Image: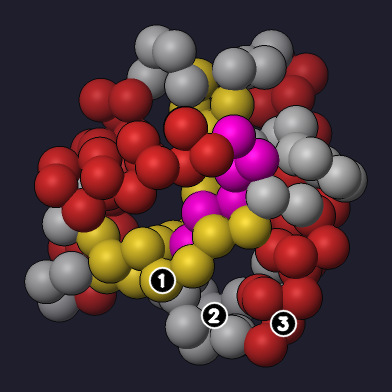
Amino acid sequence: MTFKAYLVEDSPVIRENLVGFLQDVADAEVVASASTEDEAVTWLGQHRDGWDLTIVDLFLKRGNGLGVIHACRNRAPHQKVVVLSNYATADMRQRSEQLGADAFFDKSAELDQLVAYCETVRSSLD
């Protein structure tokens, strides 16, 4: 079963690669994306039931991913929020978790773990 993914990533190249990766490897339908905190928060507010997984980068064109994570705090139980960032410090992992992120993945070293996580999201929707 395909799940609906929402991307919050400011780099057009990374965003494009993630869309292809998620569609091909994780069997996801990428429903939309944003490059700023405000865009992401607005979209999420207008599409409360329009996603199953939101993938958030911490550093955005304007604002940051922590604000996006916080905006997802009242999501449905099946909806998951994960951070995908090159800034994978212990402090950022902890801060993301405190704000409600379900998982944190390092862009450069943990893509396999992201794929495995996507599999659990997809399985939980069956």
Quadrant occupied by the N terminus: bottom left
- The magenta stretch is 6-11
Q: Amino acid at mark 1?
A: Val
Instruction: Quickly name the residue at label 3.
Output: 45
Of circles 2 and 3, the one toward us is 3
Comes first in the chain, label 3 or label 1: 1
Residue 42 seen in render: yes
Q: Secondary structure at mark 2?
A: loop
Instruction: Examine the rendered structure and indicate whether residue 87 appears above or below residue 111.
Output: above
* Residue 3 x %, y %: 27, 69
Q: Is residue 72 magenta?
A: no
Q: Which mark is residue 31?
A: 1
> Which disc, if any, is residue 76?
2
What residue is rendered at 74% in x and 24% in y?
92
Viewer-nearest of discs 1 and 2: 1
Work out whether 81 lies above or below 31.
above
Q: How many residues crowd mark 2 within 10 Å: few (<14), some (14–19), many (20+)?
A: few
Residue type at mark 2: give it. Answer: Ala
- Gap between marks 2 and 3, in whole Å? 13 Å
Image quadrant for the C terminus? bottom left
Q: CA distance from mark 3 to mark 1?
A: 14 Å
Who's the residue at 47% across and 32% down the image?
14
